[in-house]
Amino acid sequence: MTDRLRAIEGLALAGVLTAVFDGVHALGDQLVQNSHDASTKGMHGSHLVYVTDGSPVEEDPWRHGKAGRTCTASAYGRRSVSRHVASYSAVQLASTLAVTRTLGYRVPASALLTGAAINAVTHGVIDRRDPLLWLAEKTGKTGYIKHATVVRKAGGEGTAYPKAVQDDAGPGTALMELDQAVHRAIGVAAALVTAWITLRKGDRRP
């Protein structure tokens, strides 16, 4: 294969992978993600919470047996984000395989797994929130985060939000927009690395 054809193949593959990663991003990050994991993956702190649902022990200190098992809030947050990253990665890998194999192209396992690992590890780090807040501070976006918040309307007694509450991290907020921007930018880098490894492997027949 000539250098020109190799470059064209690399550009085409990187473009397809970028499109796939970006196209299924919301599917894995929003639709497939467990609602409870979405609300608890950013939990931090050394205070104890219950393993079953993440609620603080101090609010209900009388649970016993399996229902009474506890862990720190940080440990609970790590478990939640790990489940989310696992399902997100599964969606991304399955989609990448489906698209490339349908088009008659074989991306080596090593390339696929490297790209998935880049997305998975960075996704988990970003979704723990503190690293994203640090990045926002370093890039001068703290004011943007404080300004662009939303108010969740009151749902009434017995709901998660019995009273209206200000949200600075969920859908519609600046932090959410920054989260999505960083995820997508990293997806481009992961696509480039995946394409580069693939070209070095040689045989791409299905």
Image (tube, rainbow, N blue to C red):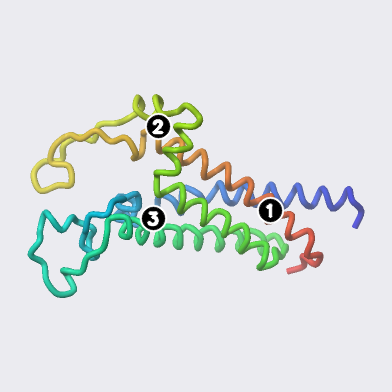
Q: Which mark is residue 33?
A: 3
Mark toward the start of the polypeptide (1 vs 3): 3
| Disc 2, SS | helix
Question: Which residue is more in the foreground, 31 or 166?
Answer: 166
**Distance from label 3 to label 2 (Cα)?**
20 Å
Mark toward the start of the polypeptide (3 vs 2): 3
Where residue 149 appears, x then y in whole percent? 32, 30
Where residue 50 appears, x then y in whole percent? 20, 62
Work out which residue is located at the far bottom of the displayed protein and give it: 65
Q: Is residue 138 left or right of residue 20?
A: left
Residue labelled with disc 2:
174
Mark toward the start of the polypeptide (2 vs 1): 2
For the point 36% across and 39% down, the residue is 171
| Disc 1, SS | helix
Q: Is residue 31 left or right of residue 191?
A: left
Where residue 20 appears, x then y in whole percent? 59, 51
Residue labelled with disc 1:
193
* Kind of residue indicated by mark 2: Ala
* Kind of residue indicated by mark 3: Gln
Q: Which callout, 3 or 2, points to the residue nearer the camera? A: 2
Q: Is residue 11 left or right of residue 135?
A: right
For the N terminus, the quadrant is bottom right
For the residues labelled 3 and 2, say whether their Cβ atoms are less than 8 Å apart. Answer: no
For the point 16% across and 70% down, the residue is 67
* Kind of residue indicated by mark 1: Val
